[in-house]
Image: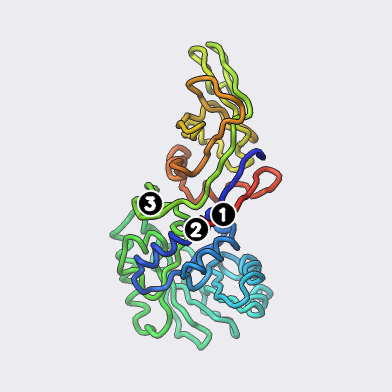
Amino acid sequence: MQRSELTIDLGAIRRNVKRLLDVLDGAQLWAVVKANGYGHGAVDAAGAALGAGASLLCVATVAEGLELREEFREERILVMGPTATSREIALAREARLELAVSSNEIPEGVRVHLKLDTGMGRWGLSELPEPTREVVGLMSHFASADCDPEFTATQIRRFREATEPYRHLTRHLANSAGTLHFPDARFDAARCGIAIYGLSPFGADPGDEGLAPALHWASELAQVRQLGAGESTGYGRRFVAERPTWIGIVPVGYADGFRRDLTGAEVRVGGELRRVVGTVSMDAFAVELERELPPGTPVTLLGHGVLAEDHARVAGTINYELVCRISSDPARARRVVLDS
């Protein structure tokens, strides 16, 4: 195999979408496939989500929307980030993209979703203007649906009050966390990202929400060696053996997306959970072994019980960032798409 192999299970994405649709109980699910489908592949993820019942695709930029339009000629595509130039608006109009708008300047000839700031403090209008004929939707964005129920309830109330006069338009507020834990947030549609990939928006085991990770990342032991007492592995000698210790070298590092601060995380080596030791370098990291194992022994970096959420806790970040950072460079990783 190559240095590592990424396997994307489209069947898992479809099952996650169906699970979310069950939760939404009649509201539409709009699949967020920005940032190359959170590292899973935007086109593949979009196709799986649409096939399972998603009604619209959400991206961050016009460029992302144009890439999807080449593959999905008739599907609705919403650009959620700001469009900075008249050129971008013209391209969006020509490609029949829909735009989120956070100002009183509403472009003509393109479907618009007015974005209200209910507490995110980022993009968004402080008050809704009178919608023009171009406006088809009203939206807002949760700041803390994963961790602050009280403020989330405040945002739901603000959004409902502001949009009540325009109930004939499509109203959408909920993200993955809002969809799963706040029934009042579902309105007409929900924009789900992290959950369709089988990752938890709460940093917990995704199985708790009936979700299954769609990404499996694997490598193998490239070298196995025994350190004597007092010998070290890796830059900075951060791991020094206290006694004779077997270690395995995995040919994956932070250039591949296995972050430098994942020292101490656990990966599965030949079916057993083993600890990452020493400094993760650009192209390799070390694992502590109980015994000598042959080179070529499989190593699971993510998937099959090795959770992105657990890695994220070690690294002091969130699962979103970990999967988005995995390299899609074919020179470093082989990518496999399967349909379970």
What's the mark number on residue 338? Answer: 1
Q: What residue type is labelled 3?
A: Phe
Residue wearing tag 3: 202
C-alpha gap between disc 3 and disc 1: 27 Å
| 211 lies above or below 63 | above
| 49 lies above or below 135 | above
Secondary structure beneath disc 3? loop
Circles 2 and 1, Cβ within 8 Å, touching? The answer is yes
Please state if 22 lies on the left or on the right of 45 as rendered. Answer: left
Please state if 13 lies on the left or on the right of 184 as rendered. Answer: right
Task: Work out which residue is located at the far front of the displayed protein and give it.
Answer: 340
Quarter containing the N terminus: top right
Q: Which amino acid does label 2 sit on?
A: Gly
Residue wearing tag 2: 11
Q: Which amino acid does label 1 sit on?
A: Leu
Q: Can residue 84 be seen in this view?
A: no
Q: Tell which tag, 2 or 3, sits nearer the viewer.
A: 2
